[in-house]
Image: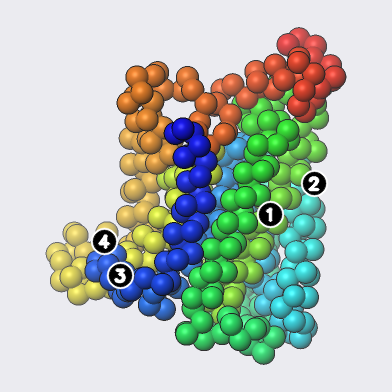
Amino acid sequence: MSRNLTRLAPLVVLVVLALLPYSTLPLPGLFDGALNSPGTLQLLALCLVFGGVALSYDLLFGFTGLLSFGHALYFAAGTYVANLALTEFGLGLGAALALTTVVGVVLPLLVGGVALRVSGIAFSMVTLATAQVGSIIVLQDPGGLTGGEEGLAVAREPIPDVFIGVFNTVNKYWLALAYLALVYLVVTLLTRSRAGRVWEAIRENERRVEVLGLKPYPFKLLLFVLAGLLATLGGVVHLLLLGGSTPRVTTSDFTLGLLVMVVLGGAGSRWGAVLGGVLYTYLDSRLTDLAQSPAVQDLPSWLRVPLSEPLFILGALFVVVVFFVPGGIAGLVARLRERRAGRRPGTTPPADGTTVPGRAVEQLREAAGRGVGVGAGQPRDGL
C-alpha cells in the first residue's frame, strides 16, 4: 500500500504545482507576494527549470558516476541557439525549437564521442575544456551575435503572445512545470529500462560490466547525449522565462552549481535531485535579496561580509551536507525511513525504483544469468 502511495506521489505533487497559480495565499518571509503574484511565479518557475536541469545532470553523475564539468555548455547552447534562431534568423518558435533540438543532440554527441574515450579526472578535464571554449566564444561576441558580457535580448515578435509580458507569467510558470515533468518522466523511464541497469552497473564497477560481455562506451555515449539534450531544452525554457540569454550560464561555475544541487538533494535520487535544484535556486535568489537588505547592511563587519555573499553561505551549506548528511536530503529521508521500520540502512531497495547502491553489477549479472535484461546471452567469463 505504501509503495503504491509512493509511486503516486509525483503525480500528486504535479497536480498541486499546476494548481498553485490559483492560490492567493501570502507567505511572508518566504516570498514577497502571494503565491499567484508575478514575482513569486517567476521565482518558482526558475526553481522548476533548475530542478529539471539538476535532474538531467544527476542522470550523468548520480546514476552513472560521470563527473562532468561541462554540463553548462548544453544549457548555454539551448538558450543562445534558440535566441539566435528567433532574433537573427527570423525563425518561428517551433522552427527555433527544432533547430535547438538538433544542436542539443549533435553537440553532446561530438563532445561525448571524444571525452568518453577517457575516464576519471581526464574525462572531467575534457568536459571542462569544451565548456570553457563555449564560454570564451560567447564572451568574445563574434560578429556581435552573442552580446558578450551584456548578454543577448530575445526578439519578441516570433514568440507567442502567451509568453510575453508580466501578466502572462503564469503561462511561463506552467511551461517550466511542463519541462520539469518531461525531464522527470524521461529520466524515470530511462533509469527503469534495461539500459538503466547497465548505467548503474557502470557506476558501481565498469570493469566487471566489460567482463559480462557488454561495451560500456555506447551506453555512456547514449546517456551523455540524452542528458545534454534535456539540459539544452532547459536552456530554451530559461530563455523564454528571462527574455534573453546571459553569459553566466556558460561558465564552469554554473556546472559546479548543478553539482551542489545534486549533492544537496541526493545523487542518484530523482526527487532528491529535483528538490536540490529547487532549494538551491530559491536560496540563491532569496539570499541575494537578503544580502542587499538594510538588516544585513547594518550588522557588524564580521557578520555583514559573509552574509553579503550568497555563494559563501551556499558553499558552507554544501560542506555541512557533505560532512553531516551524506547522501543529501534523499539519503537522510531513506535512513530515517529504514530506521523507523527497524531495518539496517541499505538493505532494502529504494522506494523510487532505483538500484540498491553497490548491488548494480550483481543484479545485472543475475539478470543475465536468468536470460533476461540487457546482456542476456552475452559472455559472463569470470562472474
Tag 2 secondary structure: helix
Residue that label 4 marks = 307
User: What residue appears at the point 36 percent right and 54 percent down from the top-left corner?
Assistant: 314
Q: Residues within 10 Å of mark 4 (few under 14, many from 20)?
A: many
Q: Is residue 132 visible?
A: no
- The residues tagged by marks 3 and 2 sit, at their Cα atoms, a distance apart of 50 Å
**Residue type highlighted by circle 1:** Gly
Q: Residues within 10 Å of mark 3 (few under 14, many from 20)?
A: few
Q: Position of residue 343 (x, y in %)?
A: 39, 19
- The residues tagged by marks 3 and 4 sit, at their Cα atoms, a distance apart of 29 Å
User: What residue appears at the point 77 percent right and 82 percent down from the top-left corner?
Assistant: 91
Q: Is residue 370 visible?
A: yes
**Residue type highlighted by circle 4:** Leu
Placement of 152 over or under 374, stated as above or below: below
> Which colour assignment does the render follow?
rainbow
Residue that label 1 marks = 228
Residue that label 3 marks = 25
**Residue type highlighted by circle 3:** Leu
Q: Residues within 10 Å of mark 2 (few under 14, many from 20)?
A: some
Q: Position of residue 339 (x, y in %)?
A: 34, 24
Viewer-proximal residue among 370 and 81: 370
The disc label shown at residue 113, or none: 2
- The residues tagged by marks 2 and 4 sit, at their Cα atoms, a distance apart of 43 Å
The disc label shown at residue 344, or none: none
Placement of 117 over or under 22, stated as above or below: above
User: What residue appears at the point 62 percent right and 56 percent down from the top-left corner?
Assistant: 182
Q: Mark 3 or 2 closer to N-term?
A: 3
Tag 3 secondary structure: loop
